[in-house]
Image: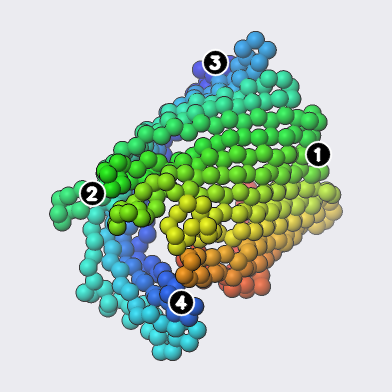
Amino acid sequence: MKYKISDEWTSQTIVSRTRSSSEGYVVALTMLSNETLRQQVTNQDYPYYGTDIQQNFNGDFKIGKLRNRVVAGLDFYSLRATRNDATVNMPALNFRKPGDAYNNFTINKIEPLFANATYTNMVSNDERTYSAYVSDVLNVTDRLLVMGGVRADRYINKGVYYPSRDSIAGNYNQTAFSPRLGAVYQVVKDKVSIFGNYMNGFNNVGGSDFNGNTFKPNQANQLEGGVKFDFNKISATFSYYDIKVTNVTRDDPDHVNFQIQDGTQLSKGFEAELIANPIKGLNIVAGYTYNDSEYTKANPSINGLRPTTAGSPTTANLWASYRLTEGAASGLGFGFGGIYGSEYYQTNTTTFKFSIPSYTVLDASVFYDRPKFRLGLKVDNLTNEKYWSYRLAAQNPTRVTGNITFKF
């Protein structure tokens, strides 16, 4: 809901309610060595319920000759999830030569194993977040813009509730502040700009150390700088970033089964994005990213190594489409492109490493777009590339999708 308070201020109220769920069987594969893995199957009923209420006030006004664009607001977010699941572990197998075990991994043979499995029943998520924030973009000159803002969050985690024992575990509360600063300067008016920014983010962490001190939120501090070009037929952005994550928990070397919160992780990289319309009807979108990430203070088994959650160090994407704009075939178009991801580690420790191969997935499309209808045909994974997710799940093979759209 939007409401115009005055010529300078508007109000925006957003209320949303969502439900999502994970139901049925979920498979996870754990690498044990260069030749063996273990299959794990979970049967679950895991619904999530989310509620978000946000109130924003947007202002666009001048103080003297300086234009201010202000956003100030409050946000309430609630997440609740109930969980009822059980897990069975299959025997370790040689995935290069699985033998009969290859045919044993079917729904008909797995389902009876859950007859004697122990199901957990719990309220796994019961969280509330209360936030307040304000930011201002200030036009110092017609070429120089600066931005400043801060966000405060009060996070309340009511813990995991176990109905069978009528008990709660893991409840905790945390408060965090997140500042943000930035500047943009147009070297060439409306054509070439340089920018820089500082951003802070956080992630709430539960638990406490050996001395009973509750953990603080993880803090991520990012510095980014770059240049943006915006010409008639081409626009591009090039940027470099450096992110340091602090307050990461790691094993306490002096107290078994406890953790300390002095770990750090560094991530830095380069990003490029290009959008071009070189001739009438032709549109090209391309992107490239390179990321270098490592644990700089962590458990000895991973210290100095790349986190497995960092994904591919190098990724790239390209999509080009051409549409006829004149003649009897006006509206007929074609598209082609794809994505690339370099090899990355699914397991990366000093004692064992397992990597997911690089992949290149190509897509193509053909369409006919007219004022009152649109016909489209899209082929995903044109070459039937075999590639896997971080969870070692095989991704979609070649897929053909057709659609008809009517416009009124």
User: Extreme bottom residue here?
Assistant: 99
N-terminal-most mark, 1 or 4: 4
Instruction: Please name which of the two marks, 4 or 2, marks the residue nearer to the observer.
Output: 4
What amino acid type is highlighted by mark number 1?
Phe
Q: Residue furthest front?
A: 254
Could you tell me which residue is drawn at 73 percent across and 48 percent down? 274
Q: Which residue is mark 2?
A: 169
- Which type of secondary structure does the marked residue at label 4 adopt? loop
Is label 3 in a helix, a strand or a loop?
Answer: loop
Helix, strand or loop status at disc 1: loop
For the point 63% across and 14% down, which residue is it? 62
Residue sitting at 55 percent across and 36 percent down? Answer: 199
Q: Quadrant of residue 225?
A: top right
Residue 6, numbered circle? 3
Going by the image, does 401 lie left or right of 245? Answer: right
Left or right position of 393 against 237: left
